[in-house]
């Protein structure tokens, strides 16, 4: 069984920072690419950033230079450091993970709310 547990969301003023964490629990499988996505009200879920096990990263243009994705392979945990937040960043943030031995399967976290006030 695989499970993702997120934490770190909340309410912050524009210009502030938050750090999200997502821990993947797994007994049998190696965690490969992990990522963060977000979904604002009335909008489709969109990519924020991804990171491979070897720490290659991809960022959405809208967050480049402000957000940093990182991971701790020993803890199967991915982080998202979000700086210079603005109201457009308000959304539910979801992490996901892919696993060796489970081709085509993607696990998702339950989501954590990030609200940026102006």
Image (tube, rainbow, N blue to C red):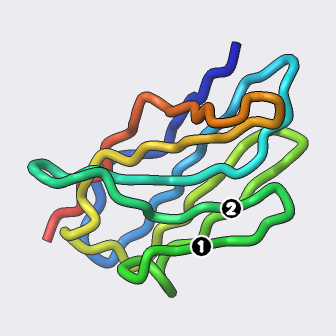
The residue located at (42%, 61%) in the rendering is 47
**Nearer-N-terminus badge (1/2):** 2
Is residue 12 positioned above or below 32 on the image? below
Which corner quadrant holds the N terminus?
top right
- Nearest the viewer among 25 and 105 is 105
The residue located at (51%, 38%) in the rendering is 7
Quick check: 62 left or right of 36?
left
Residue 14 picture quarter: bottom left
What residue did someone put label 1 on? 58
What residue did someone put label 2 on? 51
Quick check: 65 left or right of 114?
right
Residue 23 picture quarter: top right
- Nearest the viewer among 101 and 50 is 101
The residue located at (75%, 59%) in the rendering is 52
Residue density around tag 2, few if under 14, some if 14–19, many if 20 or more, within 10 Å: many
Q: Residue furthest top?
A: 1
Q: Are marks 1 and 2 in contact (CB under 8 Å)?
A: yes
- Nearest the viewer among 59 and 18 is 59
């Amino acid at each position: 069984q695989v499970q993702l547990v997120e934490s770190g969301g909340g309410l912050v003023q524009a210009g502030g920072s938050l750090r999200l964490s997502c821990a993947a629990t797994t007994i049998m499988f190696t965690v490969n690419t992990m990522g963060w996505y977000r979904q604002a009200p009335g909008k489709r879920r969109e990519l924020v950033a991804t990171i491979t096990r070897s720490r290659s990263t991809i960022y959405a243009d809208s967050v480049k230079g402000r957000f940093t994705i990182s991971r701790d392979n020993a803890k199967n945990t991915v982080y998202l450091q979000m700086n210079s937040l603005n109201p457009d960043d308000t959304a539910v943030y979801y992490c996901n993970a892919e696993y060796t031995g489970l081709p085509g399967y993607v696990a998702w976290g339950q989501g954590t709310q990030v609200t940026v006030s102006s």
